[in-house]
Image (cartoon, helix red, strand yellow):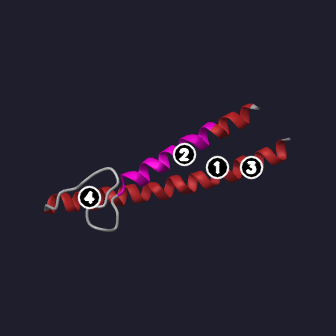
Amino acid sequence: MTVFEIIFAIALLLFSIAIILVVLLQEGNQKNVGAVTGVADSFLSKSKARSVDAFLSRWTKVIAIGFFVLVIVANAVMYFVK
């Protein structure tokens, strides 16, 4: 394996772990269906859950886009560098 292949493999591994963690931390669409956390039904916790869900949703999109760009770049580099 070349240095580029090792770097891309490590970066893809980190992106995949990050996207798995961010998705697991999100609440489900139904009431109290979070995979990891459980949120009480008070007013303060509902607004906190919305802000946390918005934050996690935004980061899910960012990490997913980064993952796909990294996969495309890695494939292009591996194809043209041979």
Relative height, residue 32 to residue 8 (above, below): below
Q: Secondary structure at mark 4?
A: helix
Distance from disc 4 to disc 3, alpha carbons, whole Å, reads 38 Å
Report x, y in % for residue 24: 40, 52
Q: Which mark is residue 70?
A: 1
**Tag 3 residue:** 75
Q: Amino acid type of disc 1?
A: Leu
Distance from disc 3 to disc 1, alpha carbons, whole Å, reads 8 Å
Q: Secondary structure at mark 3?
A: helix
Query: Which stretch is magenta?
Result: 10-26
**Tag 2 residue:** 15
Of callouts 4 and 3, the N-terminal one: 4
Distance from disc 3 to disc 2, alpha carbons, whole Å, reads 16 Å
Relative height, residue 37 to residue 53 (above, below): above
State which quadrant residue 10 falls in: top right
The residue shown at (46%, 56%) is 60
Of callouts 4 and 1, the N-terminal one: 4
